[in-house]
Amino acid sequence: MTDIDTILLDRDGTLIEERHYLSDPALVALIPGVAAPMRRLAGLGCRFYLASNQSGIGRGLFSEDDYRRVHARLVDLLLAEDIVLGGAAHCPHSPEDECGCRKPRIGLWQELAANFGLSPQKTVMIGDKVADIRFGQAIGCAETVLVLTGHGLDAARKLGLDAPGAPLQRCAPGPGRPTWLASDLGRYLEHLVQKKEHVHAHRI
């Protein structure tokens, strides 16, 4: 297994509960079960980054200030769990804008990689949409993970994937298919913790 040290996350429906065009900080809620493995991974040297499409800004449904307030609330919730985000990038455009930063295009990755020195070979991309998986594959990520929270069930159907019989299962290779299908973010992160702890134990 590649020694993953960068965890690139979609926001809505992956790290936090899905709200339709979220603009109210009071509605920000972490997906249950993510905090403990995030803390453990941070202790093992992993860093967390967000890459998020926010077309509600381009559609005029909420403002950049609304986005910043929601993001600040998310940062506060994570800090309360002793988790620090390495950084975040978002696309504010609508699909009609044909920008270079809306996933699955790789502009958000280029921004984060330039600012923080990230390497795709050590990165996993985790999201709840087909665009997230294609984004991770276009970057050249070591792994991609589709979670079944948020829009994940619909995305799995679009990719011809059956709902997993287990909380985490490896996917057969295919166009646009993720490396892993996970019931939620916490399940994959727990798997990554175990892998990294195993590697760490063998290095001692």
Image (spheres, helix red, strand yellow):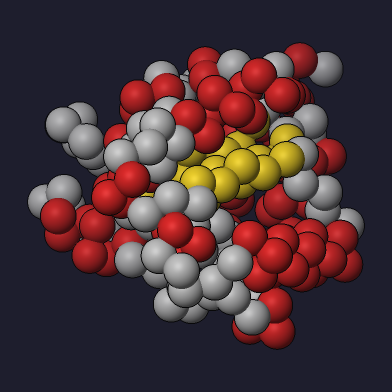
Q: Nearer the viewer, residue 20 or 163?
A: 20
Locate residue 158 relative to residue 49 in the image: left or right: left
Above or below, comparing residue 126 to residue 150 in the picture: above
Above or below, comparing residue 131 to residue 142 in the picture: below
Q: Residue at x 73, y 24 (%)?
A: 116
Q: Residue at x 33, y 45 (%)?
A: 97
Q: Position of residue 56 (x, y in %)?
A: 45, 65
Q: Position of residue 94 (x, y in %)?
A: 37, 54
Above or below, comparing residue 142 to residue 42 in the picture: above
- On the question of residue 100 being in view, the answer is yes
Locate residue 203 relative to residue 139 in the image: left or right: right
Q: Residue at x 79, y 30 (%)?
A: 45
Q: Position of residue 170 (x, y in %)?
A: 32, 41
Residue at the left extreme, as displayed: 160
Quarter-of-image position of residue 79: bottom right
Quarter-of-image position of residue 123: top right
Above or below, comparing residue 30 to residue 139 in the picture: below
Quarter-of-image position of residue 43: top right
Q: How many marks?
A: 0
Q: In the rendered image, which quarter contains the C terminus?
A: top right
- On the question of residue 40 being in view, the answer is no
Locate residue 11 relative to residue 139 in the image: left or right: right
Q: Position of residue 89 (x, y in %)?
A: 61, 42
Q: Nearer the viewer, residue 194 or 73?
A: 73
